[in-house]
Image (cartoon, rainbow, N blue to C red):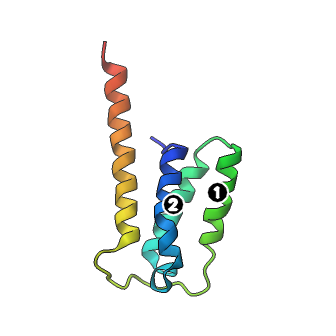
């Protein structure tokens, strides 16, 4: 089940501080999270908010010096992405349960 725009925007807002951290901005962990956000956005129908957000995410993925994971504990981008997946899964379970109740 694709994420909804609200969940994606919440995840994007959580990721923004990581983009400002030098060690995170080029990290594959952050770039992976941004790619997941981008792919989820591309699954949604277009709207003004969608277009703005997609443009911002695409711009954030254009980095000059990518690097491998530094092994940070905690890994904020990784944790944010895990929260995103959990929220998607919870919404999917709630939707499948709601449609089966009679």
Q: Secondary structure at mark 1?
A: helix
Which residue, as the protein is rendered here, is positioned at the far left?
73
Q: Is residue 68 above or below residue 50?
A: below
The answer to whether the residue labelled 1 contacts the one labelled 2, judged by CB atoms less than 8 Å apart, is no
User: Is there any visible trace of residue 31 in the rendered image?
Assistant: no
* Residue 13: assigned label: 2
Q: Separation of disc 1 and disc 2 at Cα?
A: 13 Å
Q: Which of 79 and 1 lies nearest the eye of the viewer?
A: 79
Which residue, as the protein is rendered here, is positioned at the far top?
102
Q: Secondary structure at mark 2?
A: helix
* Residue 67: assigned label: none
Q: Which residue has dot 1 on it?
A: 54
Q: Is residue 48 above or below residue 59?
A: above
**Residue at 58% over, 46% down:** 43
Residue 40 left/right relative to 90:
right
Q: Pinpoint residue 85: horizontal percent, then vertical percent.
A: 37, 53
**Residue at 30% over, 17% down:** 101
User: Is there any visible trace of residue 71 in the rendered image?
Assistant: yes
Q: Which of 16 and 25 lies nearest the eye of the viewer?
A: 16
Q: Nearer the viewer, mark 1 or mark 2?
A: 2
Q: Pinpoint residue 38: horizontal percent, then vertical percent.
A: 57, 58
Q: Is residue 76 above or below residue 81?
A: below
Q: Pinpoint residue 20: horizontal percent, then vertical percent.
A: 53, 78
Quarter of the rendering occupied by the N terminus: top left
Residue 81 left/right relative to 41:
left
Neighbour tally class for label 1: few under 14, some 14-19, many 20 plus, Cα within 10 Å: many
Q: Earlier in the sequence, mark 1 or mark 2?
A: 2
Answer with the quarter of the image where residue 92 lies.
top left
**Residue at 33% over, 50% down:** 86
Neighbour tally class for label 2: few under 14, some 14-19, many 20 plus, Cα within 10 Å: few
**Residue at 53% over, 53% down:** 9
Please state the total of marks drawn on the protein image: 2
């Amino acid at each position: 089940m694709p994420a909804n725009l609200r969940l994606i925007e919440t995840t994007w807002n959580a990721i923004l501080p990581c983009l400002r951290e030098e060690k995170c901005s080029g990290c594959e962990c952050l770039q992976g999270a941004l790619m997941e956000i981008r792919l989820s956005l591309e699954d949604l129908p277009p709207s003004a908010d969608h277009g703005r957000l997609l443009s911002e995410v695409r711009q954030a993925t254009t980095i000059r010096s990518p690097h491998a994971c530094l092994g940070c504990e905690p890994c904020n981008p990784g944790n944010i992405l895990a929260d995103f997946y959990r929220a998607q899964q919870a919404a999917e379970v709630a939707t499948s349960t709601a449609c089966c109740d009679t």
